[in-house]
Image (cartoon, rainbow, N blue to C red):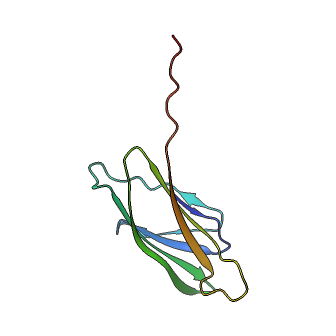
Amino acid sequence: RFVNLSSVTVRVLPNRTKLFDLAPGASRIFSLPPGDQGTLTYQIAAIVDGKVFPLADSAEGYARSNRINIVAYNSDGEDRRQPVKIVSFFERPPQPAKKKE
């Protein structure tokens, strides 16, 4: 899942497939193809005043039982080098409830 919590549009290229833009506050679920090798590669750039700022060119290993969340957020501070930062983290999807016996 790609999430844009920043105040600018970010451009995402997952697994070198289809490029897409995420508006501020938007998110998009990217499903990995069956039989994938366990690595998500992605490139992310921020679009600020018509200029493109590369943010990440990375790869994340994963287990099929986890979800990957990649979040773009505004940088803090007055003298910042990049307008947007990226953080990624894993989460386990909800497990089906066990029936009581």
Does residue 36 appear left or right of residue 93 in this picture? left
Q: Nearer the viewer, residue 35 or 88?
A: 88
Numbered marks: total? 0
Does residue 27 appear left or right of residue 25 in this picture? left
Classify 47 as above or below 30: below
Classify 97 as above or below 84: above
Where is residue 84 drawn, in percent x and y?
Answer: 61, 77
**Residue drawn at (59%, 83%), measured in percent from left and top?**
82
Classify 57 as above or below 40: below
Where is residue 88 drawn, in percent x and y?
Answer: 51, 62
**Residue drawn at (37%, 49%), measured in percent from left and top?**
63
Classify 99 as above or below 95: above
In the rendered image, the residue lying farthest to the right is: 78
Does residue 40 appear left or right of residue 67 in this picture? left
**Residue drawn at (65%, 86%), measured in percent from left and top?**
80
Task: Place residue 13 in its image quadrant.
Answer: bottom left
Where is residue 94 drawn, in percent x and y?
Answer: 52, 37
Q: Nearer the viewer, residue 26 or 59?
A: 59
Does residue 59 appear left or right of residue 71 in this picture? left
**Residue drawn at (41%, 69%), measured in percent from left and top?**
42
Where is residue 45 drawn, in percent x and y?
Answer: 51, 78
